[in-house]
């Protein structure tokens, strides 16, 4: 296979026209090859990823699980390729510690830090590791690629700014990005101000003002979409999330595809509701593909030795269909994972 990228219309630089080779399944079938696709927000202790693999998702990012359990799941052979956060970090008694769906061991509760400047300096220079650093270190030792923080003050105590700052500082010192569940008025603003790297849901509790959205995009923050759960459950909330994401994307913000797989009933694999909502939020088909193929939390794709690619059979959307949410969704949901050796550029 050559490195040349045959013309693929409005699908962007990640898409290549291919034909299935004569020695593979469905010989001669034509379509589009994409990089392996990723669901950037799942919970593998709440729902298996096997059905998603069968329908085009090659990798997942687990954002809240018992650290030992998810490390074991991630070591399993085959797909999906798993990256994970380990436990939710939250305030003592905070969300989701009181939720019946939260698996045992999946929540790490922390007391608030002392935000006095002298005490903070003392902590930085003290020989002993503080509780925040210890909590971050635990996730790292279990192989975490990201630190997950839960902010939901309506469901219990939540971190104040000083404690969130301490978590962000400790995670960044360990080389890990911080992903925040921000639910409730002011929580997205708090996460943005504290320098968190990712919001694990497009903000859905309130309409963010344009200045705050622009600040998040300029800071390089990424937002994981998870729009399908709102489309499924509450049209009004869905519109808030879609509007926030539309303005974030327009401001140059980095959008990651994610479904919150494990949160109730969701179509496995590339989810039609999620894709259609992303298009409604102003993402072109090429942007949706980029959101699905983004390597986060890795800095660069690590698929060199995987030997798999995504194949979407048949004609791709073109012309007006590239802006049609249902047409783009219907096409992408036929994606399947195939060995790269079966695909030939055409």
Image (tube, rainbow, N blue to C red):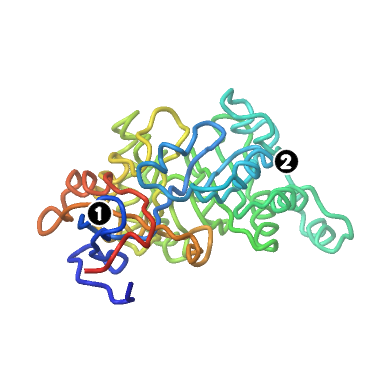
The residue carrying pointer 1 sits among few (fewer than 14), some (14 to 19) or many (20 or more) residues within 10 Å by Cα, namely many
Q: Quadrant of the N terminus?
A: bottom left
Q: Is residue 308 left or right of residue 282?
A: right
Foreground residue among 173 and 76 = 76
Q: Which residue is mark 2?
A: 110
Residue 278's spot in the image, x, y percent?
29, 49
Give residue 252's quadrant in the image.
bottom left
Residue 283's spot in the image, x, y percent?
27, 55
Q: Is residue 128 left or right of residue 100?
A: right
Give residue 126's quadrant in the image.
bottom right
Residue sticking out furthest to the top? 100
Element type where label 2 sits in the image? strand
Residue sticking out furthest to the front? 23
What residue is shown at x 35% (from left), y 34% (from top)? 267
Q: Which residue is mark 1?
A: 282
The disc, 2 or 1, on the residue closer to the chain's N-terminal end is 2
């Amino acid at each position: 296979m050559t490195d040349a990228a045959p013309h693929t219309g409005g699908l962007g630089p990640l898409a290549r026209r291919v034909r299935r080779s004569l020695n593979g399944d469905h010989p001669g079938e034509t379509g589009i090859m994409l990089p392996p696709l990723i669901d950037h927000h799942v919970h593998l202790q709440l729902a298996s990823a096997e059905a998603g693999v069968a329908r085009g998702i090659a990798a997942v990012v687990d954002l809240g699980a018992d650290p030992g359990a998810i490390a074991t799941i991630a070591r399993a052979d085959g797909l999906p390729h798993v990256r994970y956060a380990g436990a939710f970090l939250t305030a003592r008694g905070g969300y989701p510690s009181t939720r019946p769906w939260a698996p045992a061991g999946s929540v790490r509760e922390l007391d608030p830090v002392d935000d006095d400047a002298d005490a903070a300096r003392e902590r930085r220079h003290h020989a002993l590791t503080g509780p925040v650093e210890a909590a971050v270190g635990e996730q790292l030792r279990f192989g975490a690629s990201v630190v997950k923080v839960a902010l939901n003050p309506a469901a219990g105590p939540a971190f104040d700014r000083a404690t969130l700052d301490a978590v962000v500082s400790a995670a960044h010192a360990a080389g890990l990005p911080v992903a925040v569940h921000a639910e409730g008025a002011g929580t997205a603003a708090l996460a943005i101000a504290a320098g968190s790297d990712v919001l694990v849901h497009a903000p859905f509790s309130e309409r963010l003002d344009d200045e705050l959205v622009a600040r998040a995009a300029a800071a390089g923050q990424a937002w994981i979409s998870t729009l399908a759960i709102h489309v499924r459950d509450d049209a009004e909330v869905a519109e808030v999330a879609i509007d926030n994401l539309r303005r974030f994307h327009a401001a140059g913000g980095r959008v990651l595809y994610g479904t919150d797989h494990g949160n109730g009933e969701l179509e496995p694999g590339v989810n039609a509701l999620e894709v259609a909502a992303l298009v409604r939020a102003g993402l072109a088909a090429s942007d949706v593909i980029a959101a699905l193929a983004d390597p986060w939390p890795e800095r660069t794709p690590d698929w060199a030795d995987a030997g798999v690619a995504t194949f979407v059979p048949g004609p791709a959307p073109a012309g007006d269909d590239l802006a049609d949410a249902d047409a783009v969704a219907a096409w992408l949901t036929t994606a399947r994972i195939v060995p790269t050796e079966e695909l030939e550029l055409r």
